[in-house]
């Protein structure tokens, strides 16, 4: 597991955002931000609610989809792991309230 990005909700459109249909959210490419910020702009009808939609999260890259399940054990599930297209991501909340994303990226040549 390694640090990947910080996700910050916003109401402003950012350049280069990509739409994620499953969660009805626009995301900026954190890999191209000098401080690894992933801006998130939720559509009004997004199924995402609660702390994930209202507070920042810290994203961690994992080596496999199975590792998401192992590392999230004991955490509150905010959003079950789902297919983003280029990755599989799950969102969780730690016992002390931090919002965490565990993300496995598909190989670029897949």
Image (spheres, rainbow, N blue to C red):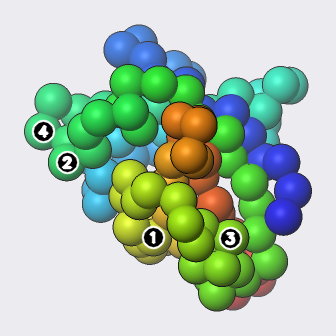
Cβ atoms under marks 3 and 4 closer than 8 Å = no
The residue beneath circle 4 is 45
SS at circle 2: loop
The residue beneath circle 3 is 71
Question: Is residue 46 in view from this perspective?
Answer: yes
Seen at 38% across and 24% down, the residue is: 54
Q: How far apart are marks 4 and 1 (CA)?
A: 20 Å
Seen at 64% across and 63% down, the residue is: 103
Name which of mark 3 and mark 4 comes first in the sequence.
4
**Residue ranking furthest to the top:** 12
Q: Tell me if residue 7 comes above or below residue 77 in the rendering.
A: above
Q: Where is residue 18 in the image (x, y as percent from the top left)?
A: 47, 44
SS at circle 1: strand
Q: Which of 73 and 89 is in front in this view?
A: 73
Q: How far apart are marks 3 and 1 (CA)?
A: 12 Å
The residue beneath circle 1 is 81
Seen at 67% across and 39% down, the residue is: 58
Q: How far apart are marks 3 and 4 (CA)?
A: 30 Å
Q: Tell me if residue 82 comes above or below residue 44 in the rendering.
A: below
Name which of mark 2 and mark 3 comes first in the sequence.
2
Seen at 55% across and 27% down, the residue is: 56
Cβ atoms under marks 4 and 1 closer than 8 Å = no
Q: Tell me if residue 44 comes above or below residue 79 in the rendering.
A: above
The residue beneath circle 2 is 47
Q: Tell me if residue 86 comes above or below residue 10 in the rendering.
A: below
Name which of mark 1 and mark 2 comes first in the sequence.
2
Q: Position of residue 70 (x, y in %)?
A: 66, 79
Cβ atoms under marks 2 and 4 closer than 8 Å = yes
Badge 4: few (under 14), some or many (20 or more) residues near its Cα, within 10 Å?
A: few
Q: Where is residue 86 in the image (x, y as percent from the top left)?
A: 58, 68
Q: Nearer the viewer, residue 41 or 109?
A: 41
Q: Distance between the residues labelled 2 and 3?
A: 24 Å
């Amino acid at each position: 597991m390694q640090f990947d990005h910080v996700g910050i909700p916003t109401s402003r459109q950012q350049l280069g955002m990509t739409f994620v249909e499953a969660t009805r959210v626009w995301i900026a490419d954190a890999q191209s931000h000098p401080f690894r910020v992933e801006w998130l702009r939720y559509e009004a009808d997004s199924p995402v609610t609660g702390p994930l939609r209202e507070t920042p999260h810290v994203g961690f890259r994992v080596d496999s989809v199975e590792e998401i399940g192992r590392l999230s054990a004991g955490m509150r599930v905010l959003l079950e792991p789902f297919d983003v297209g280029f990755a599989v991501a799950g969102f969780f909340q730690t016992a002390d309230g931090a919002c965490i994303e565990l993300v496995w990226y598909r190989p670029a040549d897949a």
